[in-house]
Image: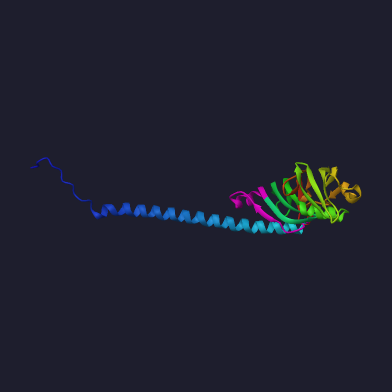
């Protein structure tokens, strides 16, 4: 007879064991997947580091004045390799000799498409800036016939030129403007006590950069607190193992 109470019997160990084994299998599968993902990420990053270095070496061998720093953006990298299409390649270089001046370059190449040989292709667009420091510009202008010069910013398109000699210290205001594909001019607009004979060719001093790397050309020029900034661009640039096509 029963008094209405319920008696719960313990679950036999044999009934609990399959559940524990099932959970253990899922944990093993999850751990394996995580390990595989980590390995793929590491492989991707190793591959992109190698490609960055190879791209920098290739740029130098094709005429870049120095070996730049190259960073292929986007993740994952290996899928871009398979597609032979790279959305963004970031390029930086310091102290790049360009004709009479030295500049620091920062640029982004977008829409880089490789041919099946992986050694030639097309760069859809490159946009960048080059900075020519005031000290470098003053040195070049001094060689041109006006020694003892220093430059500083006086506006978006103007510089204040100071002439420091033993017998005179005076200044002048000059404008900076682009006058050709790879040329900009410093033109004296007003003087504050500097005799014209001391200015020499600086009265209309032209800076010509014979050939920018990667087929770039100057689009505009402006003045910053650090120096003269040139904005450069290039479109549909074809390249081959032997250089730009």
Q: What residue is rendered at 83% in x and 49% in y?
A: 170
In percent of width and height, residue 227 lies at: 75, 49
Tell me which corner region of the image, top left, top right, bottom left or bottom right, holds residue 241.
bottom right
Q: Is residue 194 visible?
A: yes
In percent of width and height, residue 138 lies at: 81, 53
User: Does 79 sit left or right of 21 as displayed?
Assistant: right
List the single residue furthest toward the top.
Answer: 4
List the single residue furthest toward the front.
Answer: 167
In percent of width and height, residue 157 lies at: 78, 42
Residue toward you, 62 or 101? 101
User: Does 88 sit left or right of 133 as displayed?
Assistant: left
57 drawn magenta: no
Residue toward you, 84 or 205? 205
76 drawn magenta: yes
User: Does 190 sit left or right of 106 as displayed?
Assistant: right
Q: Is residue 181 above or below residue 101?
A: above
Q: What residue is rendered at 58% in x and 50% in y?
A: 76
Q: Is residue 100 visible?
A: no
Task: Give the position of the N terminus as an image quadrant.
Answer: top left
Q: Which residues are magenta?
A: 63-89
In percent of width and height, residue 222 lies at: 76, 43
């Amino acid at each position: 007879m029963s008094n209405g109470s319920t008696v719960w019997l313990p679950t036999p160990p044999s009934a609990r064991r399959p559940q524990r084994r099932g959970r253990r299998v899922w944990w093993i599968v999850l751990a394996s997947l995580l390990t595989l993902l980590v390995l793929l990420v590491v492989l991707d990053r190793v591959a992109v580091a190698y490609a960055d270095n190879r791209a920098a070496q290739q740029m130098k061998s094709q005429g870049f004045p120095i070996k730049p720093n190259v960073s292929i953006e986007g993740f994952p990298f290996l899928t871009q390799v398979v597609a032979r299409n790279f959305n963004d390649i970031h390029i930086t270089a310091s102290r790049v000799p360009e004709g009479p001046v030295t500049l620091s370059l920062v640029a982004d190449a977008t829409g880089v498409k490789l041919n099946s040989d992986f050694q030639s292709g097309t760069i859809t667009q490159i946009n960048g800036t080059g900075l020519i420091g005031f000290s470098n510009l003053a040195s070049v202008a001094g060689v041109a016939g006006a020694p003892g010069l220093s430059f500083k910013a006086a506006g978006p398109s103007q510089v204040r030129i100071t002439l420091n000699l033993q017998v005179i210290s005076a200044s002048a205001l000059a404008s900076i403007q682009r006058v050709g594909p790879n040329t900009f001019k410093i033109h004296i607009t007003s003087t504050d006590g500097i005799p014209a004979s001391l200015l020499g060719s600086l009265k209309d001093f032209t800076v010509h950069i014979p050939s920018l790397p990667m087929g770039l050309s100057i689009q505009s020029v402006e003045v910053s607190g650090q120096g003269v900034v040139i904005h450069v661009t290039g479109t549909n640039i074809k390249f081959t193992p032997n250089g730009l096509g």
